């Protein structure tokens, strides 16, 4: 039974449709991320699960129980807010104890669980501090402890790392993932940061304009995007426009023919291929025939340290190429004639 | 430029404080003629204590201010919560109605209250055969009518600064509506509520016009009584009473500063 | 919209809750504000018997016609220019004052703010009375001018005394919103203007002033409205020949016993006030 299940959920605010007929099932114990640009409906979806919003239509279930119209305090989920939303008038320990107090647990048990929760996030020594006396990272941990101490069936996280600086964010990503595996609670994580989603998630759902476009493991989403939006939103990608010739051949705008896997269904085709899957060769390198090739000329080179990026004009199509900066790499100059080469499997067909 | 700004600032402070200081100094003048200084004395303060009229007026003022502050703080806080946190039919009308008593001048408010209570007392006395008259009750009711709005404005400002996620977090942590209010919302807006209450108290203790319209025999408040004396001329007794009233005001300033100094931030401050 | 979805039912329940919370104060304001307003409106059309009793029933426009009396025009004009002069004087003095406070270090700023708060919270009647003491015929100001050989000051019971009293009374109402507006301004914008070759004066005129106009408007409204309806100040510092709208209206109730006429005057004054605030809100200000 899925931990969270949304069936045909729509949320309208007046004339605006924030979430549009969304179907989603999050498995028990899974780290699931909702990824999308701001305003795509991901936060609204999270708030529908938390109970801060009620669906206009559709069903919200937690472990099979319908909760769509239950207020937040009657749902077995807890939330870590983007702003942390710690109670400024309470100490760290009082913040963490709040949920347990509201559930009227015996005070001895509350004290014990608060202590354990603070140990878990390594903040036992700040139990009597006020939230305003803590650093951003520490506040974040208190918010996490406050939610986890209630042992929710599902933990909802709304861009919890958004306010932290890069280094701390990366450290917290690893820590969060570890924590999730340790406690075994289902996490639903909302973010607009694709790197974050790829790093931590078991599965990712990509949203845009209120719709769920693709759900899959990080590698599925990255390697095999099914739509132009997903392909474009996650990482850098070349989108090559063309015309279907036969079940495995596409003729690009410039007239070059390339091979693709998977029969393009319509006559107009967009082929998506990651820059790091492309390679630059010279004519003299004689690439094997099964590889796709586009002759072109380097028009820009960007040095990124670990990677060298090229922009190559292939007559009608401009492609971006990223080559790993390994020893023995032939570095091209602007103006060099090159062959852009890739395996047909590396290119996927996406729909608009 | 900087020099000019500073000079202007000190001139303004002198303008603010010199008249008050002169008044305070003259209240300790022993002479019956205010303007001829003959020596330091506290005799006029002693006379306040012997003056039954002043003491009764003072007692009336405190009763009216106390009652109207408590009532208007409760009503105004609820009003602020309703407009700031809910959407309901008639909200805009209510919002407008809430602003009007602040905008309208004292004199017109006084006229409204007088005519209303004359009609209302007629009606009530006719229906119930009672002989109710203008007095402390009508003064208190009038003060509540304008104080609700001032309390609501102050509390709304505080509510507006409160990160809504904090209340959501409480609900998320299994607090019911009432618990969210009692454990989270109320403690966090308390400085606003107390600030509103102090403003209401000050306005009530300040009011002359409205009170003089709706007061009956024996229900004169201290400002109205002093106002009556002042119109007849300057006396050392008024100077002393005025100094006492100023002292009361200072006490309220101190209290309101203490209230606003509470270090509780309102969340969302870590971005 | 308008569908009977469970969400709509929940939203309805929530709206009901909000309405119920507003209800006590809502009812209070309707009973003790809206109803009195209507009664004043009704009274303004009533007539007055020869003994000074108000007769409800014989509805007429007599009271409103009297508003066009030259005497009323004179009083209204005097009130209006005094209110405008008060507002302008307060603005001219308070703007640089608020600017000075807002540009101090936080510690100094807080200390100075407290010094502004004290007169703001101090009893208005007492503060006005202080000027009666100061300006009296042998009061301190007069004594000083006599010592200086300038002769007696005869300011009390003139419009000038009223003007001083009004400025003194309402100056804090101007300072605080101006301070709030200047303090909250983003100073990097002024620096940006200076960086883009604006002189100090031009930067003020093109950046600081436009950014602080909400404070200017709020302060002006907060001074103008009570100044126009002032009663205590003219009653204490003014004389028989300096009647203003405020004491004129009060006279109709406490002395002349012409309630319908007093009501009509009140309605007219309220209309002016509501119009002024309407303009204020249209101008974009929102915080009182």
Image: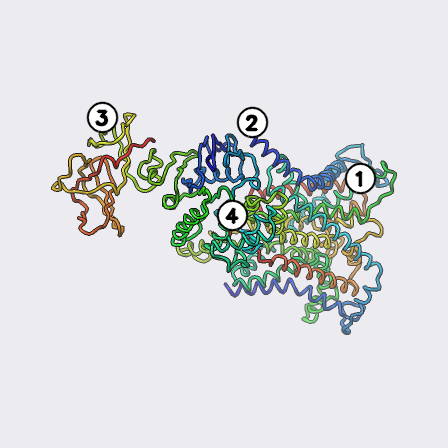
Q: Which residue is mark 4?
A: A147
Count the marks. Answer: 4
Q: Nearer the viewer, mark 2 or mark 4?
A: 4
Same-chain status of marks 3 and 4? yes
Crowdedness of circle 3 by 10 Å Cα count: few (<14), some, many (20+)?
Answer: some
State which tag comes first along the sequence, 3 or 4. Answer: 4
Q: Label 3 marks which chain's residue?
A: A
Tell me if A256 is positioned left or right of B140 in this view: left
Residue depicted at 46% across the width and 35% down the height:
A2
Crowdedness of circle 2 by 10 Å Cα count: few (<14), some, many (20+)?
Answer: few
Determine whether label 1 and label 4 are within 8 Å by CB.
no
Return the x and y of residue A192 as percentages of the image width and height: 41, 43
Cα distance in 3D space between marks 1 and 4: 56 Å
Query: In the image shown, does A74 or C68 lie closer to the viewer?
Result: A74
Return the x and y of residue A48 as percentages of the image width and height: 51, 37
Crowdedness of circle 1 by 10 Å Cα count: few (<14), some, many (20+)?
Answer: few
Q: Which residue is mark 1?
A: B120
Quarter of the view holding residue C54:
top right
Q: Which residue is mark 3?
A: A245
Return the x and y of residue B117 as percentages of the image width and height: 79, 42
Label 1 secondary element: helix
Mark carried by residue C3: 2
Determine whether label 2 and label 3 are within 8 Å by CB.
no
Cα distance in 3D space between marks 2 and 4: 36 Å
Residue depicted at 65% across the width and 39% down the height:
B94
């Amino acid at each position: 039974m899925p931990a969270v299940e949304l069936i045909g959920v729509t949320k309208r605010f007046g004339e605006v449709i924030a979430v549009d007929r969304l179907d989603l099932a999050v498995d028990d114990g899974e780290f699931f991320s909702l990824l999308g640009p701001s305003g795509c409906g991901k936060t609204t979806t999270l708030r529908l699960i938390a109970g801060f919003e009620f669906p206009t239509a559709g069903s919200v279930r937690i472990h099979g129980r319908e909760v769509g119209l239950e207020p937040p305090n009657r749902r077995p989920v807890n939330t870590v807010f983007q702003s942390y939303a710690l109670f400024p008038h309470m100490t760290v320990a009082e913040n963490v104890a709040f949920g347990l107090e509201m559930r009227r647990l015996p005070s001895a048990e509350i004290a014990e669980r608060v202590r354990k929760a603070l140990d878990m996030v390594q903040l036992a020594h700040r139990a009597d501090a006020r939230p305003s006396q803590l650093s951003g990272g520490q506040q974040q941990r208190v918010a996490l402890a406050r939610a986890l101490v209630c042992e929710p069936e599902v933990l909802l996280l709304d861009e919890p790392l958004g306010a932290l600086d890069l280094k701390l964010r990366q450290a917290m990503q690893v820590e969060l993932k570890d924590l999730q595996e340790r406690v075994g609670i289902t996490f639903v994580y909302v973010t607009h940061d694709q790197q974050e989603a790829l790093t931590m998630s078991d599965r990712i759902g990509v949203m845009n304009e209120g719709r769920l476009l693709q759900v899959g493991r990080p590698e599925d989403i990255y390697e095999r995007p099914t739509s132009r939006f997903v392909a474009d939103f996650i990482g850098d990608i070349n989108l090559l426009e063309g015309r279907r010739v036969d079940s495995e051949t596409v003729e690009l705008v410039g007239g070059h023919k390339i091979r693709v896997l998977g029969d393009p269904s319509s006559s107009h085709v967009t082929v998506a291929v990651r820059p790091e899957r492309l390679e630059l060769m010279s004519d003299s390198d004689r690439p094997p025939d099964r590889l796709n090739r586009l002759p072109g000329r380097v028009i820009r080179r960007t040095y990124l340290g670990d990677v060298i990026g090229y922009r190559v004009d292939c007559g009608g199509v401009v492609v971006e190429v990223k080559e790993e900066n390994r020893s023995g790499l032939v570095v091209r100059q602007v103006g060099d004639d090159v062959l852009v080469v890739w395996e047909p499997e590396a290119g996927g067909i996406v729909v608009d | 430029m900087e020099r000019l700004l500073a000079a202007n600032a000190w001139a303004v402070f002198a303008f603010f404080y010199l008249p008050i200081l002169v008044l305070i100094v003259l209240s300790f003048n022993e002479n019956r003629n205010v303007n001829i200084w003959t020596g330091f004395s506290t005799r006029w303060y002693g006379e306040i204590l012997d003056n039954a009229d002043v003491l009764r007026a003072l007692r009336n003022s405190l009763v009216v201010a106390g009652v109207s502050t408590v009532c208007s703080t409760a009503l105004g806080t609820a009003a602020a919560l309703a407009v700031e946190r809910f959407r309901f039919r008639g909200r805009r009308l209510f919002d407008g109605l809430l602003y009007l008593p602040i905008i309208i001048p004292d004199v017109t408010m006084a006229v409204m209250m007088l005519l209303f209570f004359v009609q209302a007392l007629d009606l009530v006395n006719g229906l119930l055969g009672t002989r109710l008259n203008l007095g402390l009750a009508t003064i208190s009711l009038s003060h509540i009518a304008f104080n609700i709005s001032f309390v609501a404005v102050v509390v709304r400002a505080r509510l507006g600064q409160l990160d809504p996620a904090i209340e959501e977090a409480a609900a998320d942590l299994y607090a019911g509506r009432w618990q969210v209010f009692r454990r989270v919302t109320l403690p966090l807006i308390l400085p606003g509520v107390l600030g509103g209450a102090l403003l209401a108290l000050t306005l009530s203790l300040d009011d002359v016009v409205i009170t003089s319209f709706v007061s009956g025999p024996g229900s004169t408040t201290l400002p109205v009584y002093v106002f009556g004396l002042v119109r007849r001329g300057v006396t050392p007794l008024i100077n002393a009473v005025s100094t006492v009233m100023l002292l009361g005001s200072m006490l309220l300033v101190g209290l309101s500063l203490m209230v606003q100094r509470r270090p509780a931030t309102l969340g969302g401050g870590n971005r | 919209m308008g569908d009977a979805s469970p969400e709509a039912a929940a939203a309805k329940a929530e709206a009901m809750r909000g309405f119920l919370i507003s209800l006590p104060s809502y009812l209070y304001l309707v009973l003790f504000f809206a109803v009195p307003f209507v009664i004043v409106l009704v009274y303004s059309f009533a007539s007055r018997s020869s003994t000074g009793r108000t007769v409800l029933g014989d509805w007429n426009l007599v009271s409103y016609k009297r508003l066009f009396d030259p005497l009323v025009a004179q009083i209204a004009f005097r009130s209006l220019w005094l209110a405008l002069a008060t507002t302008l004087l307060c603005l001219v003095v308070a703007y640089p004052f608020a600017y000075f406070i807002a540009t101090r270090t936080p510690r100094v700023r807080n200390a100075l703010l407290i010094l502004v708060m004290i007169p703001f919270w101090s009893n208005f009647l007492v503060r006005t009375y202080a000027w009666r003491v100061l300006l009296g015929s042998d009061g301190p100001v007069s004594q000083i001018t006599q010592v200086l050989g300038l002769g007696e000051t005869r300011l009390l019971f003139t419009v000038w005394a009223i003007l001083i009293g009004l400025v003194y009374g309402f100056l804090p109402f101007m300072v605080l919103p101006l301070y709030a507006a200047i303090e909250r301004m983003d100073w990097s914008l002024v620096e940006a203007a200076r960086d883009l070759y604006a002189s100090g004066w031009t930067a003020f005129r093109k950046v600081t002033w436009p950014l602080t106009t909400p404070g200017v408007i709020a302060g002006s409204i907060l001074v103008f409205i009570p100044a126009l309806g002032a009663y205590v100040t003219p009653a204490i510092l003014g004389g028989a020949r300096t009647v203003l709208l405020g004491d004129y209206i009060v006279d109709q109730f406490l002395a002349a016993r012409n309630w319908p006429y007093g009501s009509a005057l009140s309605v007219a004054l309220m209309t002016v006030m509501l119009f002024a605030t309407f303009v204020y809100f249209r101008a974009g200000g929102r915080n009182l």
